[in-house]
Amino acid sequence: MQAQKTIAKPAALEGKGLFSGQPVSLTFQPAPADTGIVFVRTDLPEPAPIPALVSGVAASPRRTVLTNGTASVETVEHCLAAVGGLEIDNLRIEVTAPELPNIDGSC
């Protein structure tokens, strides 16, 4: 069995949502083995975890939306592409708005 990977220390970035223009901050946190990739909406009254699972994908035009109950996070595709490209298995991604920042459009 291959060892799972996470990041060594937290990293953060900020920008504006592509569709909403709303300011948003992301904080990438190391996560224990078997956590998977989990977005956490920290702007809600209670932090809401949203696992990056196919079963949580909601239909939406021109963007990928992940949901968990009533909580959702949008435009996650570039972020998830970068995480996958780095072969990271476990990561907590704290987000302060309903949409990830656009930055320069790359991952």
Image: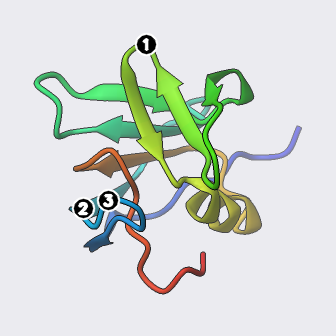
Residue 6: where, in percent of width, then height?
A: 56, 54
Quadrant including the N terminus: top right
Say which of marks 1 and 3 sits in front.
3
Pointer 1: residues within 10 angstroms few (<14), some, or many (20+)? few
Given contact means CB atoms under 8 Å apart, are the residues at marks 2 and 3 in contact? no
| Residue 31 visible (yes or no) | no
Mark closer to the chain start, 1 or 3: 3
Three-letter amino acid code at the position of disc 1: Gly
Marks 1 and 3, how far apart at CA: 21 Å
Q: Mark 3 points at which residue?
A: 20
User: Residue 24, labelled with which disc?
Assistant: 2
Residue 43: where, in percent of width, then height?
A: 16, 40
Looking at the rendering, which quadrant does residue 15 occupy? bottom left
Three-letter amino acid code at the position of disc 2: Val
Marks 2 and 3, how far apart at CA: 10 Å
Residue sitting at 28 percent across and 67 percent down? 21
Above or below: residue 6 compared with residue 72: below
Q: Mark 1 points at which residue?
A: 69
Question: In the depicted view, which residue is nearer to us: 52 or 23?
Answer: 23
Above or below: residue 93 compared with residue 106: above
Residue sitting at 69 percent across and 63 percent down? 81
